[in-house]
Image (cartoon, helix red, strand yellow):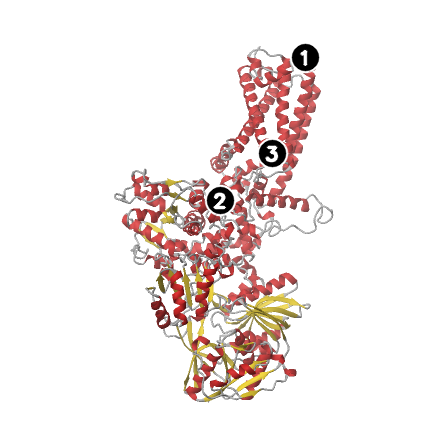
Amino acid sequence: MKILVPLKRVPDPDTRIRIKSDGSGVDLDGVKFAVNPFDAIALEEALRIKEQLGEVEVVVATVGGEECVEQLRVGLAMGADRALLVKTADSLDWLAIAKVLVAVYRRENPEFVLMGKQAIDDDSNQVGQMLAALLGIGQATFVSKLELIENNHKARCGRETDAGIETVTVKLPAIITSDLRLNEPRYVSLPGIMKAKKKPLEEMGLPDLGLTVASRTQVLKLEPPAPRKAGLRVKTVDELLDKLKNDARVL
Amino acid sequence: MADILVIAEHDNGQLKQATLAAVAFAHKVVADGGGSFNILVIGESVGGTAELLRPYGASNVLVADHAELRHPIGDKYAQIIADVAGQRGATMTVGAASTFSKDILPRAAALLDAGMLSDVIDVHRAGDEFIFKRVMFAGNVIATVKLDGAVKFLTVRATAFAHAPKGTESSPVVGVPVDAGKLPSFIEYGGREAKETSRPDSTEARVVVSGGRAIKNAEDFERLIGGLADALGGAVGSSRALVDAGVTPNSLQVGQTGKVVAPDLYIAVGISGAIQHLAGMKDTKVIVAINKDLDAPIFEVADFGLVGDAYQLIPELVEKLKK
Amino acid sequence: MSPTRETFGNIPHGSVVIFYCLTVLTLAVFGNGVWRRVKLWRQGVSISVCALLAGNLRQIWNKLRPGVRRLLAEGLGQARVRGRGLASWAHIWLFAGFMVLLLGTTMLEIDHLASGLSPALKFHQGVYYIIYEFTLDVFGLLFLAGCLLFFWRRLRRPPSVGHHATDWYVLIFFLAIGITGYLVEGLRIVWQRPVGIAAECSPVGLLISRQFSGLTEASARSAHLTLWWIHAALVFGFIGSIPYTRLMHTIAGSLNLFFVRPELGRMVPVTLEEVEKAERIGVSAVNHFTQQQLLSLDACMECGRCEEACPAFATGKPLSPKKVVQDLKGLMGWTLTARGSGIPDGQTAAIPQQPRMLHDETIEADTLWACTTCSACVRVCPVRVDPLTLLTDLRRNRVGESALSGTAATALRRMQSSGNPWGLPAAERADWAEGTGAPTVKENPSFDVLYWVGCAGSYDRRAQRVARAFVKLLKHAGVNFAILGREEKCTGESARRLGDEFLFQELAQANIATLARYKVRRIVTHCPHCLNSLLRDYPQFGGNYEVVHHTQFLDQLLTQGRLSVAGAASPEGAMTYHDPCYLARVNGVHQPPRNLLTLASASMSSARIDLREMPRRREQTFCCGAGGGRMWMEEEPQKRVCSVRAKEALDTGARTVAVGCPFCLTMLTDGVAAQTDSARVMDVAEILAERLKL
């Protein structure tokens, strides 16, 4: 069995995001990067299936620049068997990424895809679903419980919805996106990353996949939300409500 | 001229109020640059739901009603939406951001090779184009974006668009033919385990109300913390002290050994503010502290602090919120 | 005639020959048994014994001296056996008795051989004889008393003491040896008929001989010979069985006392090259331990002191240091059976097919992670077994193999990305100091001493108050100090104890570079974990500093009169002081904080200051539960280490619990608040600042 796990390089979740003064982008000075936590959860689930079933190949893949190799190595260190980097300098939006992943999928032909439901930088929650549509296969999103059934031809999933946990059974191959509650990913330290250097990591460009894709989304400006005021002691409930409604605008 | 398709959300026929925020979005776009919008309701025996949507100024309330559509299954619904949006030539398809719309709309968008923007909080016209604002980095960044392409899909944050008011006109209800044989069948619905409460999970809620040692027992917790959370449509959380005392289950614990939350508003009631707790909610946008002890460390991190007895202040707060 | 007796008196020549043959046989059995165990130890990583013997005599002696000292003081001197009441006495008496009897027998044999060479060399006579016989009689009683005490104790079966059937056998043997020894002596006196002092110098023997006074000389001799043989057989049996029973601890224990690295709070570094070469880090199989660690497993007597001292065990966690040692010992023994002796795996029914795994099978994950690294087990072990290092070696492997997840892993990730375990912005690290007037090293480059604040003092709102109080005291005393400010990073202490050695090294090297840049030599810190790391971990990477705890520093200031206490307010209510593990036990500092609380150094009358002591105090302190990365791991409400300690503190009747560590401050605040509203937990510096009205 082969499981494809696309992952994304994102700023470390604890980073205090600062925006450049001209609003043209995020200030990445001194920022550390990590594997998108949701993707790490997806990878963890794939690895647990591998530990359980034995003959499973877990392939991690990402789209981006050379710096993404760092995150692929983390994936390999966690236990993935192979890594793929689709190298591009372009900033691609979600539909474009999905199209690239279609090509990767066709190349790898996995039994299914496990990926994070969203990336913590753009919080879009689109790529998995789009990939499923482009491939014409099923999807199970925001999965917090995953079980392979019927001789690994189907996946019974618990999905975290607003109204409660919904159970669906999806035919494989399918795209499964992970929710926070699926598992707790294993921690990877330097020795693991060093060992991972021996595992195969392949790089290819968009032309190698026979693709030309372009982003349709254009970011014009970034700005912070309403600035936080310093701590204020209020004296009455009325004052508190007034501040929350009118100053902080959270009500 | 925009031709918008609003996807209504309902729970077994019960209309979700957030749909009206999506309708409000449509109103704004149309008011800005002309055009019209339709509302699409998908499900089984959803005539009643469609009726509720007639007074909002849509050109039509479209109803795709079929037994196969009883449950909001991603592949079937996405196909219907793509078909309807394609047939009608909708330039924008929009739903209020929810697990329902997030599951289905991106799939429908890709079926039509359309781009999509999630969690939109604002829109305005600039010449021929629409400029959108959306939320990124867990709400820490507002991005102003453009999306190319004749066809766009969007989810909008329900809190960013005040619910559309009812109008005087009544839109016609139009049935959409459903060819069940052509619907995909990758996904099989297996039931839903309803949550004990309708409260959201603290890790995903916009508002979290959290109780600490000041709350004496489970009944008081439900009444005060639960009551305040419900008044704000938020989730409940607790410090470890209450879990230890058996007042709350461990699943509610917020902290370095519990849940990590990042809501827009976090109200800490009777919580001292030790680092173990703060580590679980440090990325909150606005922190409110209510505590009897004016020396409590929580007041140093809170944006707004109110010193007093929770047992008196919370009921007052709830009452005034309800007004 | 000079008082004496004939060695081998009444023993026919043939018996003596057989005796010597049996001696050789016994030693062979003994030697073989010991060698089998030594083979097990040798599968471990070499400890370069040869290196000890390199260099000139002086150098060799310097290397050997500490080990020899320990052998003398702790082996012969039984220094570490004390502290357990009756059990300590039992062992000391048994051991003293045995050693004297052993020495006596050796002297006797030497005399026998010497007089065989020349009668003039015989020394077992006269005054020496009298003293000898008397001493042996007395010590023989001590030996028996020790045995009986142990018997009685084992009958009562205290829960922490390990028990096997062979233990009865050993004690019975000892008793039998002791009793038959006296019987032999008594019967010898019957047929030898010494008079006067020559008889009275063996009082016990004399007493026994009176019970047999009715025997004829012939029957006395016959009985003597029989009992002599029984006694000899028992002794041979005992010697031969040493390597096969708990008695192996005599050899392994002595060796361990010699070879062990005794410092507390110390961890062995590992380089990236070593890890690359071995393709692993830490221990995942028994032969990854060092030879000294493996022999220490055989030194363990299952006495259970470590288990009694362990805070994890006390709160129902699945961790018993004794069991860890014994389980690893079992695994060590198993590996030899399965691999050695030319028996291929799987060919004998008794040998299991699957190799027995160390992780999860022998030592469970829950056991590993329950340890707070408080070092109580290391401190109490009479033979210096170190269960703590065994566990941290295992942890290193688990982290290296990505077998750690959950909240502790999150803390590690945050340490790496933000330089503190809570993931708070590095840029905000010095915000606590705003308005305190604490200068950074940039603002005050000619500082005398660096105040190392640590992560808690920098980010934890409660602990920031301690930092501010300390700064007030420093300024009041006119100390020329500075803080690193934003450039300070987590020392990495808990990362190292959790097992992420390279994250620790990364943090340490960054800090060492920063400290070097500002030419820091003296450091004062209010966190014992930071202190221990700066003092013991950092020198391994080139960072050598003089590090003191803030209570030591303040105590010095008090003694020097730089902190004026005139007009100090007297504290209300009783106080108690909780000794932090890493300060009191690991680093031996426990008097200065007490001086500060009673203002003793300022020669103020401490009469009005009610400082109460907990039963477990100073080096015997009981952990607060936060060490070893446990601060970031969950505990069940009923099993909290901090609750146990909080209760102990509150039981003294104190209204203020004084602490000297930010971890203890957090844990005990929680623990105390869960039990009462009317007691407060404060750092010593806060109490002092409050007292001085700063």
Q: Which mark is residue A250?
A: none
Image location of residue C53, percent across then percent down: 52, 38
Is residue B8 depicted above or below C307 in this figure? below
Marks 3/1 in contact by CB < 8 Å: the verdict is: no
C-alpha gap between disc 2 and disc 3: 30 Å
Numbered disc 3: secondary structure: helix
Of residues B117 and B298, the one drawn nearer to the viewer in this rendering: B298
Visible residue check, residue B262: no
Is residue C62 depicted above or below C518 in this figure? above
Pointer 2 residue: C375
Visible residue check, residue A93: yes
Chain to which the residue tagged by mark 2 belongs: C
Give, as a three-letter code, the residue at label 3. Answer: Leu
Q: Residue at x 46, y 51 (%)?
A: C626
Image location of residue B180, percent across then percent down: 64, 82
Labels 2 and 3 positioned on one and the same chain: yes
Residue reaching furthest left?
C567
Q: Is residue C658 left or right of residue B118?
A: left
Pointer 1 residue: C217
- The mark that comes first in sequence, 3 or 1, is 3
- The mark that comes first in sequence, 1 or 2, is 1
Work out which quarter of the rendered image holds the N terminus of chain C and state it. top right
Q: Badge 1, how many Cα within 10 Å: few under 14, some, many 20+?
A: some
Q: Single out the mark in the foreground, 3 or 1.
A: 3
C-alpha gap between disc 3 and disc 1: 41 Å
Image location of residue B206, percent across then percent down: 45, 69
